[in-house]
Amino acid sequence: MTSSPVDPADPEDPAVSAVPTDPADPADPDVALVLAAYAAYARGDIDAAVVDLDPDVDWVEPEEFPNGGPHPGRDAVHKYLSAAYAMWRELDSERSAYRRGEEIVVVHRMRGVLTDGVPLEITAADVYTVVEGRVVRMHAHADPAEVL
């Protein structure tokens, strides 16, 4: 997993300066649904992380990520997230969500130690579409500047 690190405290970082200044309304149920999935993933509860995915979700991870590419359907996403979580010995997950029209953009920073002892920090931008309480689409970008 490689990505361009983004420091949210660094206004000189071009990806940070492109982050919208108004985060999504925390009362927005779609944002809450998406952020709950990240919290579940961070604690290793993959079942809870995928519970609100449409059974036919269109899920695409960056090709440069291990096992990256398309993972169509909830079952494939569960398998992908389980494998991705298993790569971490220690994991700290930080995320910020922004509403962009009908989409929800999440800047997700993960840092920790992989199972082989290598420390890693990555930041990605994930773009979601939620329809009637179900995630129907998620496309991740290894470079947050592509989205922001």
Image (cartoon, grey):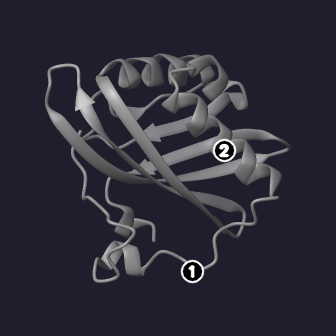
Q: As displayed, is residue 65 above or below residue 27? A: above
Q: Residue 72 placed where, x, y %?
A: 54, 28
Q: Are marks 1 and 2 in contact (CB under 8 Å)?
A: no
Q: Residue 7 placed where, x, y %?
A: 32, 66
State the SS at label 2. helix
Q: As displayed, is residue 107 above or below residue 18? A: above
Of label 1 and label 2, which has the lower sequence position?
1
Give the distance between the C-alpha atoms of the residues marked 1 and 2, in whole angstroms.
Answer: 19 Å
Q: Residue at x 38, y 62 (%)?
A: 144
Residue type, numbered disc 2: Val
Q: Is residue 71 left or right of residue 132?
A: left
Q: Residue at x 71, y 24 (%)?
A: 51
Q: Quadrant of the N terminus?
A: top left
Q: Which mark is residue 21?
A: 1
Q: Is residue 15 left or right of residue 47?
A: left
Q: Which mark is residue 34?
A: 2
Q: What is the quadrant of residue 46 in the picture? A: top right
